[in-house]
Image: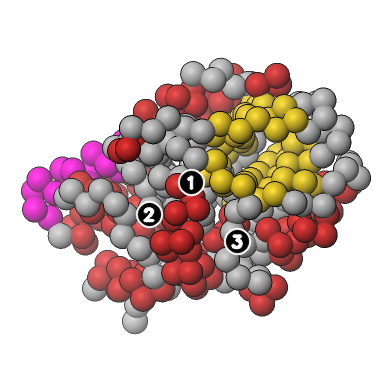
Amino acid sequence: MTKAFASQADLADKKITFEQLSPHCWAYTAEGDPNSGVIIGDQFILVSDATATPAMARDLIAHIRSVSDKPIKYVLLTHYHAVRVLGASAYFDEGATEIIASQGTYELIVERGKEDMQSEMDRFPRLFRNAESVPGLTWPTMVIGGGDPTRGEKPGKLTLDLGGVKVQIWSPGWGHTRGDTIAWVESEKVLFSGDLVEYNAGVYTGDAHLEEWPATLEALRALGAEALVPGRGEALKGAEGVTRGLDYTRQWVETLYRCAKEAAAANMDLKATMAHTRKAMDPVFGNVFIYEHCLPFDVSRAYDEARGLKNPRVWTAERDKEMWASLQA
């Protein structure tokens, strides 16, 4: 009998934490579930990452309303994954008029958004308990151009004035996806990284560009953030906390990709590559949130990239099952 995805057995609710990091910046975190960030200005609010469903978004909105009645004008999609974006419709009743994404994220929604939505709904039954409330794909209304290094593009940058606080939004480089976008509040040294940075949780790399990711992390390090809301894991406070998150993510990415390159050079198949990777990854990361869920997808992508497949293959519900079965055989 084939073992179920680790995430399909993860049905227990997680503890939500909503904490203030600076005069205008807040973190909404949940024990390894996808995080969101909130920036509250004197006039408007920006939410970074919309959550998986409108029902989940309403819980975040309730937390926001406990501290502010300002309109939530902006919702930032740090990347295209369903667990981050499909809750966006809930914010329209709260004043949202702009859904912001990078050109890379927009292109990925066009290319594979439908397939990703079905794949992730099957992977995460707890996060998509209220899937019927999702009206469909989330489409950005404001697209930040540029940022594709293969075309020699410099990233476009958007600065939003929320009233009393300005937020810079741009794509620092490829990593978790080719469309990763951050929010940076320079005046308060707070960074909202999306899944470019994780801490004490699985680093999902199923759609990643592993070779480029470390350089992108160093671009984030150069900002000198003093607080960071990662994609998963607790909010990181102080320069030392930010450094821990960056180092943790870089170690995961570099260890994973090194193992895949070793396996490719030895002409291992995917199952052997998984076993080889576990020898290096399990002792360091084996006990963190969603490790067992992430690793099969991570090894599959690293195996492809190490063998020269630069553009990540599209994950579908069918491909998920085929990959999982091959590793359980």
Give me the residue at 66% from left, 77% from top: 132
Under mark 3, the amino acid is: Thr
Whether 227 is drawn above or below 254: the answer is: above
Badge number at residue 138: 3
Secondary element under disc 2, as helix, strand or loop, is loop
Q: Give percent across and percent down for residue 210.
A: 32, 41
Give me the residue at 22% from left, 52% from top: 309
Q: Give percent across and percent down for residue 279.
A: 26, 46
| 257 relative position to 230: left or right | left
Closer to the camera in the image, 243 or 103: 103
Secondary element under disc 3, as helix, strand or loop, is loop
Under mark 2, the amino acid is: Gly
Closer to the camera in the image, 311 or 122: 311
Closer to the camera in the image, 223 or 140: 140
Q: Give percent across and percent down for residue 188.
A: 71, 21
Q: Which mark sits nearer the N-terminus, 2 or 3? A: 3
How would you rate the neighbour count of disc 3 (Cα within 10 Å): few for under 14, some for 14-19, many for 20 or more? many
Residue that carries the numbered disc 2 in the rendered image = 206
> CB under 8 Å between callouts 2 and 3?
no
Q: Is residue 261 magenta?
A: yes
State the colouring used for the structure image.
secondary structure
Q: Does the magenta stretch include residue 54?
A: no
> CB under 8 Å between callouts 1 and 3?
no
Q: Quadrant of residue 157?
A: top right
Q: How far apart are marks 2 and 1 (CA)?
A: 20 Å
Residue that carries the numbered disc 1 in the rendered image = 103
Whether 255 is drawn above or below 320: the answer is: above
Q: What segment carries the magenta color?
A: 254-268
- Is the N terminus in the top left, top right, bottom left or bottom right quadrant? bottom left
| 239 relative position to 112: left or right | right
